[in-house]
């Protein structure tokens, strides 16, 4: 029997199983209960947040009843619930075929439901052909349009739909679902691994489940963060932490040594700087908002560790470090010697505190009456840096 990927096997089968889109699910259920079902809906949101699943659940609530019909609708195979991929059916002829077939009544359900995925891919001519039918559709027809780019759907189409915006799924919700899936699949995993997969899903449940599928395919019954890093080529979190700690203590040599280990493992300079910026951003938020903030997605153990690390810095210093990293990241993309620029970045990050001490001293001398020589440039303002220890 063919293997079914996790993203399909664990697709929600009822409105009560929908994750992080409960307000939309409740509104659609109420519309059915009060007999206020519109003729057209527009579901907007990034990939993997449940748009097509919600469309199928809505179609099932409108037309379902028997287990056979319910299963066919959820599999996208029902004769009265027609799913169309607009990405591969973009032309006006496709729209005309849809319009012609919509005139026929459903075979066994109450409605003929058209689910048009990636509707923004339709051509202008196809949209124009569809417009009249959507304006005055047959009473037995319902349209559910799904898109990841709502701004590409013409206003004339949007104005004839009830629009629902699907939000990105929080990492905590994704992590909870991944734990349930692993339990059913009889796998175990490190807490940090689950959380990292949830974060890398970037709000998409499907992306997170696909990533988990890749990890499971490795054959290990217990999944670890190290395995994820090796699979995706992610920088080692421990070594990134060592780089940051070395910069905080002003130890340029230690920062260069730790970064050298990361580069030897195959991490690219661009990816390394990107990971460094992400870690510094978390530290900046923790330093500004405190360890209990919900603005960073961290597991409990990692949150405690990063909160302690954030105490070595002040928010202004971290802002400065992020700005330096971003500037060097852009420069390395067009440089013939990106390694030299990256190494210089680390030395500068580690030496920032010492440079600030000198400028602060010069500024202090000036305020005590030591005026600079004629024509001399004023002392530069001290750069914000790591906190004193």
Image (tube, grey):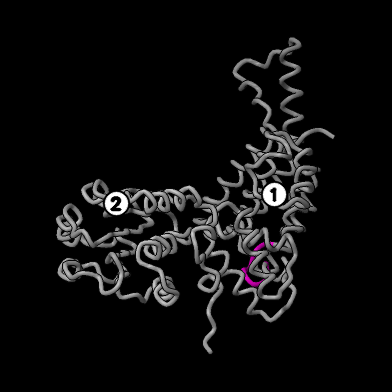
User: Mark 1 falls on what kind of element?
Assistant: helix
Q: Which mark is residue 297?
A: none
In the displayed structure image, the side of residue 293 where residue 209 appears, left or right? left
Residue pointed to by mark 1: 346
Q: Residue at x 29, y 51 (%)?
A: 38
Residue 77 in the magenta stretch? The answer is: no
Extreme residue toward the right, this view:
389
Q: Residue at x 51, y 51 (%)?
A: 22
Magenta stretch: give its range: 229-235
Marks 2 and 1, the one that precedes in the sequence: 2
In the displayed structure image, the side of residue 141 where residue 171 appears, left or right? right
Report the front residue among 233 and 360: 233
Residue pointed to by mark 2: 38
Report the front residue among 298 and 165: 165
User: Mark 2 falls on what kind of element?
Assistant: loop
Q: Residue at x 27, y 49 (%)?
A: 158
**Residue 290 on image: x %, y %:** 72, 36
**Residue 334 on image: x %, y %:** 49, 56
In the displayed structure image, the side of residue 25 where residue 136 appears, left or right? left
**Hey, which quadrant is residue 313 in on the image?**
top right
Instruction: Say if residue 93 shows up in the picture.
Output: no
Rate crowding at label 2 as few (under 14), some (14 to 19) or many (20 or more) other CA atoms within 10 Å.
some
Instruction: Say if residue 300 shows up in the picture.
Output: yes
């Amino acid at each position: 029997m063919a293997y079914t990927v996790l993203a399909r096997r664990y697709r929600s089968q009822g409105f009560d199983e929908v994750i992080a889109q409960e307000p939309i699910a409740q509104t659609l259920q109420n519309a059915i209960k009060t007999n206020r079902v519109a003729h057209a809906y527009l579901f907007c949101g990034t990939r993997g947040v449940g748009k097509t699943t919600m469309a199928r659940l809505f179609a099932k609530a409108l037309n379902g009843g028997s287990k056979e019909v319910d299963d066919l609708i959820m599999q996208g195979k029902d004769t009265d619930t027609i799913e169309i991929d607009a990405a591969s059916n973009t032309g006006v002829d496709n729209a005309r075929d849809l319009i012609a077939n919509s005139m026929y009544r459903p075979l066994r359900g109450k409605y003929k439901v058209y689910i048009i995925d990636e509707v923004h891919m339709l051509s202008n001519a196809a949209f124009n052909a569809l417009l009249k039918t959507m304006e005055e559709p047959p009473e037995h027809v319902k349209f559910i349009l799904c898109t990841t780019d709502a701004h590409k759907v013409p206003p004339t189409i949007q104005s004839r739909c009830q629009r629902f915006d699907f939000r990105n799924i929080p990492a905590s919700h994704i992590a909870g679902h991944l734990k349930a899936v692993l339990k059913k699949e009889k796998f175990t995993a490190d807490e940090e691994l689950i959380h990292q997969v949830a974060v890398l899903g970037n709000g998409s449940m499907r992306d997170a489940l696909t990533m988990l599928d890749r990890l499971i395919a490795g054959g290990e019954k217990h999944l670890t963060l190290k395995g994820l890093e090796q699979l995706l080529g992610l920088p080692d979190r421990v070594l990134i932490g060592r780089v940051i700690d070395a910069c905080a203590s002003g130890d340029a040599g230690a920062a260069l040594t730790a970064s050298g280990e990361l580069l030897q493992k195959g991490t690219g300079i661009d990816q390394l700087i990107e990971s460094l910026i992400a870690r510094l951003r978390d530290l900046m938020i923790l330093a500004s908002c405190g360890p209990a903030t919900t603005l960073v997605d961290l597991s409990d153990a990692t949150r405690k560790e990063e909160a302690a690390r954030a105490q070595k810095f002040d928010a202004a210093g971290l802002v400065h470090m992020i700005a330096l990293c971003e500037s060097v990241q852009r420069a390395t993309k067009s440089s013939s010697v990106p390694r030299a620029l990256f190494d210089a970045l680390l030395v500068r990050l580690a030496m920032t505190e010492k440079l600030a001490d000198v400028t602060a001293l010069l500024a202090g001398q000036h305020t005590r009456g030591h005026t600079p020589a004629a024509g001399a440039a004023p002392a530069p303002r001290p750069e914000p840096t790591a906190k004193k220890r």
